[in-house]
Image (cartoon, rainbow, N blue to C red):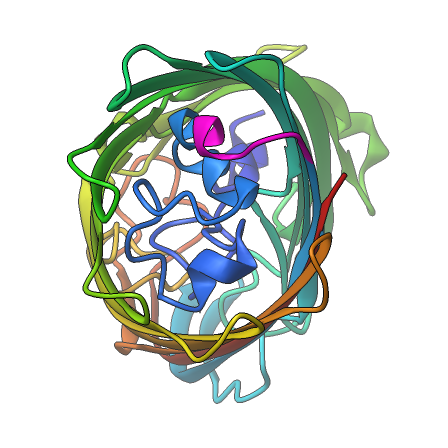
Amino acid sequence: MKKLLTLTALGTIMMVSQANAAGFNLKEQSVSAQGNSFAGATAGAEDISYSYFNAAGLTRHKGTKFILGGTYIAPRSKAKESTAVTPAGPDNDRYNDNIVHAAVAPHMYVSHQIDDKWTVGASLNVPFGMITKYDDDWAGRYHGTLSKVTTVTLTPMAAYKATDKLSLGAGFQMQYIKARLRNSAVTGVSSVDDRAILEGDTFDIGYQVGGMYEFTDATRIGVGYRSEVKHKLKGDIEFALNPLLNQDIGARLTTPANFSMGIYHDLNDQWSIMGEYGRTFWSSFDELRIIGSNGLNNVTEERWKDTSFWAAGISYKYNDQWKFRAGVAYDEGAVSEEYRTPRIPDAGRQWYSGGVQYTQNENLTWNLGYTYIRAKDGRVTLRGDHTGDNMRGPLKALYKNDIHMLGLSMNYSF
């Protein structure tokens, strides 16, 4: 059964969001915040979509609010200079196709002010997810040929205005995830590559907390924390050539906690500036253990490291209808070259964003945001001696990555 370990399996089920945030996190949960590269996301509270980063900001919004939006994510990642020593022998494949595919990350928010102290809300988000796909005969096929992940997170929230200056907020992350993976495998029945397909899903719960302090009407700071979510996936592995090896599997995967803090300041009636710092605790993703129904027990080394995110932004209110935003950011990569996988050639990246807000009337507001992300080259250097890699073989590849994102949202006040 140890030959089943040629499947990278659940150790990389989340590693497919590519270049839009460190590791596999999707920041694109607010189109208005996107216009500033998410600078001030925990302090801005300019609309209720900022509650994803800090639920305490809901106290700034009166009445009942609703937001529906989404971000079109168009990544590009091309593998250059791919070389491997596979179980079938040496392979030099100059794979040049785009391995990532465009997708839409939707989001929805609703909030209602109960009284002067309490505001409640809920959000529906896709915090993780993307598709990567290689040809079935590429050099790194034993490490992965298809990765498809879908997540949906429902977060009920409540915010409390403790004083005229201090607000507190909290919520529960109720997250469903489904994954489908495919790669080549050696099953021992033939020298021909077998095709291994894995599917799994789970539903688990985490939490978020936040606080906001308003020094004056023009200046405020915010802090937010989203907990890790401990997933217990259940699914199965199927083989194209040897169905006798099919079996049920389970795995534990902990998505990381996130801490962020931001500041927002109105310079005057037209100009505003904001900043953001975030820390993602990827070090919790140290290994992935897979347990099979008939004895499979595999540990995949991950050894990710904690990462930081910095952003600065500026906004200009032209008049009561039009507002313009801009921002820059830097996001650290979560994994070193030695442990980087072809499912996500993650690396550090720079963000350049702009946005525009149009207030159609007292009830309806539109937001448009655009971001270009330029990522560093992602070099994969897997020696083949890590736990679980002995049947996959060494792999070297150089990835060129960048991404374009376009977001649109409708904000309606009742």
Nearer the observer, 25 or 196: 25
Query: Does residue 370 appear in the picture of this structure?
Result: no
Q: Is residue 100 left or right of residue 312?
A: right
Image quarter hosting the N terminus: top right
Nearer the observer, 291 or 35: 35
Q: Position of residue 170 (x, y in %)?
A: 44, 15
Residue 61 in the magenta stretch? The answer is yes
In this rendering, is residue 217 above or below 177?
A: below
Image quarter hosting the C terminus: top right
Query: Does residue 335 appear in the picture of this structure?
Result: yes
Q: Residue at x 73, y 34 (%)?
A: 199
Q: Position of residue 256 (x, y in %)?
A: 35, 30
Q: Is residue 143 left or right of residue 195?
A: left
Q: Position of residue 317 (x, y in %)?
A: 41, 73
Nearer the observer, 205 or 38: 38
Residue 15 in the magenta stretch? The answer is no
Region in magenta: 58-64
Q: Is residue 382 left or right of residue 27?
A: left
Q: Residue at x 48, y 89 (%)?
A: 94
Q: Position of residue 81 (x, y in %)?
A: 37, 86
Q: Quadrant of residue 49?
A: top right
Q: Residue at x 84, y 33 (%)?
A: 243
In this rendering, is residue 235 above or below 369?
A: above
In this rendering, is residue 224 above or below 22?
A: above
Q: Is residue 380 left or right of residue 158?
A: left
Q: Residue at x 26, y 50 (%)?
A: 334
In this rendering, is residue 1 above or below 204?
A: below
Number of disc labels: 0
